[in-house]
Image: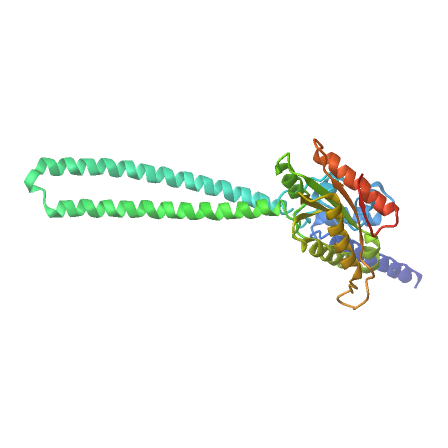
Amino acid sequence: MASRAVDAGQANGGDRLFARIGAFLAAHRLSPEPAHYAFAYEVIANCEGLVARRVAAITDGGVRLTTHDIASLGGSAVAGVPLVGDDDGDDVPLTGDADAHQAMMERMMLQLDGFDDTMRVVHAEANDFGRDLQRSADTMRDMGAEAGIEAIAALTTDMIQRVQRAESKLDHALRETEELRTALDEARGSARTDPLTDLPNRRAFDETFASLHRDTAVTVAICDIDHFKRVNDNFGHAVGDRVIRMVAQMLASEKGMMVARYGGEEFALLFEDTPLDEAAQVIERIRQVIAERRPRVRETGELIGTVSFSAGVAEGRVGEGRAALMARADAALYRAKDQGRARTITAS
């Protein structure tokens, strides 16, 4: 009996471990691959280990693991890892699915090879047709009046057939090229779009900033959702994702500024030709509208509580680079946090 009790306890413990590993995979949207399971097992089973502590630090505030994070911690990143900007601002390439990107590159190379082969065939046929046409013309010239309608008709028919074959091959190659161009355009867009909110991501924000004329007057802001970790802890990551999307939609509804998800629960805003105080007023108005909402958990109807964010706003100075300007906005954000959150602070 005692042995059975021990076995049952071990089984229950194994079930609990299995459930926690499953919850970890689901929270970080990791596919149930053996490599991901092994990584999750190391984190869950050895919760005091170095890997687990690193994961806790990286994901503090509800941020999901990226392929870069998993690889840096010794794991193997495979298909199914979400696209989320890491702490250094480097995005996972394209959609975050390494297998899909490899397949796209292989498809592109095959199509390029196919197009090259098609052009070679068409070129060879055009040369052959030119030589045949010249020989036929020489023959009819030598025959003079004996060259009949039948010979001319046969030559014309052959010419038409060859042109039609060449056009068909070229049309096929052009369709494949257009499909490839569309796929690459979509991939390029995915590389600059946050998949959770459909907002531009950090890379897109930085590229847009860099593309501005140096004389453009700019104001930037960094907004960070307050106490976001509590939302994840109390209601789960799925509800946390909905809160992020709600804030993203409210920010994006305001015209005249670029809104990007800068990482985790943080958003970056870019204003052109907008004075500091005016930009701060826009952000504060949005913040108050969000704070007045009473979001609930969709499945249970339970109130989530007040959702607020803190914001730091900075106006560009002559000769100031993006990094320095963002650093001043970030410092203003921290002052907003230190002063009690749920407020907008402008940088001096």
Name the residue located 76 percent from the left edge and 59 percent from the top edge.
289
Could you tell whether 60 is left or right of 70 in the image?
A: right
Query: Residue 118: which quarter of the image?
Result: top left
Vertical relation: 289 (above or below) 85: below
Vertical relation: 24 (above or below) 57: below
In which quadrant is the C terminus drawn?
A: top right
- Residue 234's x, y, as percent? 84, 59
- Residue 282's x, y, as percent? 73, 51
Residue 47 shows up from this direction: no
- Residue 147's x, y, as percent? 9, 42
Name the residue located 82 percent from the left edge and 57 percent from the top edge.
231
Residue extending furthest left?
145
Viewer-side residue, 83 vs 105? 83
Could you tell whether 60 is left or right of 160 in the image?
A: right
Viewer-side residue, 153 vs 200? 200
In which quadrant is the N terminus drawn?
A: bottom right
Residue 120 shows up from this direction: yes
Could you tell whether 133 is left or right of 241 in the image?
A: left
- Residue 56's x, y, as percent? 82, 46
